[in-house]
Image (tube, grey):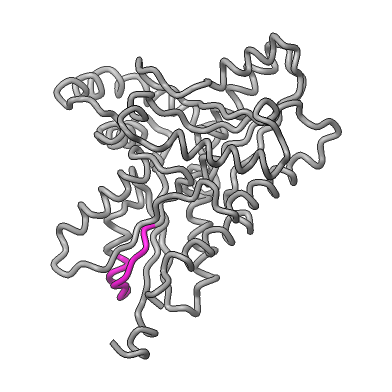
Amino acid sequence: MNRNERHQRKIGVLLVNLGTPEGTDYWSIRRYLSEFLSDKRVIELSSLLWQPILQGFVLAFRPRRLGHSYKKIWDNVKNKSPLAVFTQNQAESLQIDFANQNICVEWAMRYGKPSIEKKLDFLIEQGCNHILILPLYPQYSATTTATVNDEVFRVLMSYRQQPAIRTLFSFPDHPDYIKALHHTIQEQLQSRAVQPERILLSFHGLPLRYVKAGDPYEQECQKTAAALRDAFGKTEQEMPLVYQSRFGPDKWLGPNIADVIKEYNKQGIQNIAVVAPGFMADCLETKEEINCEYRELFLSNGGKEFTYIPCLNDHPLAISLLKNIIQQEIKGWI
């Protein structure tokens, strides 16, 4: 291949986030949950055991409860969840930045729509024979990053002519990621008359047995937490790592955020902030679980000030971070 041919190569970039229902109604959420909770990377149980429980009990009741939660945070103007809105904004902002570089940026959801299959088809139709898959999970887990890769390669199995594929592992302590978090946290706290006594770093939970089986997620979360403490000059006590979103009977990574908040109430701590550095965009687990459920838990038990610090979302520093990661990962293709 000569230099001109290499220069004309068209590159696709696919941002992939976890997923979202198409609406807040029972059937939209049921379809989404059925796909999500049927993934054997997510629920590592025999299908013979799990599917009757999922299809019979879980999907009979959970969609209604989740529907109520989604309604609290739904973007009624765009008729999308915040996760979909922010992920689309990230992709569109990056496309503007890469407009003159023969790079096509798209976004997809692992579960729900737009699907990975649909967006891979689109990128190939656009002439992209080199595609970077960028899972929007700063910390690697088989339940997130790996299942994105599974779906990408499942789709590729049906292609006669496959594109060259690169996949991103993770970026738990990437300098630009830590810089962006440090800046946006400070941005949120500088307007507060009284600074929080504790800043909780809340990550999505994971069953402990997944970690014992070799999942590096806990180590990746610890890398992020350590880098943020260094950036702020905070101790582990001042900026603790906690986990949220437990589901099912398994033992999960700890400490659990609810237990930590209850302990703070007992200690008389009255001013806390919570940030979720495991999420690149706000979603149900941040806007409803943290900002509503845990806010109420803290304030109803004697707390005075609860500050939720939004995710990076479509902040310019988030776009800069993703742009730098993309440029690094596609070296050699341009």
Q: Is residue 245 visible?
A: yes
311 left or right of 51 in image: right
Q: Is residue 27 visible?
A: no
Is residue 129 a member of the stretch shown in magenta?
Answer: yes
Residue in the picture at 71% in, 27% down: 198
Q: Nearer the viewer, residue 150 or 57?
A: 150
Q: Position of residue 210 (x, y in %)?
A: 33, 29
Q: Residue furthest right?
A: 193
Q: Position of residue 225 (x, y in %)?
A: 58, 37
Q: Which residues are magenta?
A: 122-133
Residue in the picture at 38% in, 39% down: 141
218 left or right of 35 in image: right
Residue in the picture at 51% in, 42% down: 279
Q: Nearer the viewer, residue 232 or 72?
A: 232
Residue in the picture at 47% in, 64% down: 326
Q: Position of residue 36 (x, y in %)?
A: 31, 36
* 8 is higher (above) or lower (below) than 173: below
Q: Quadrant of the C terminus?
A: bottom left
214 left or right of 172 in image: left
* 317 is higher (above) or lower (below) than 103: above
Q: Quadrant of the N terminus?
A: bottom left
The quarter holding residue 23 reads top left
Is residue 253 a member of the stretch shown in magenta?
Answer: no
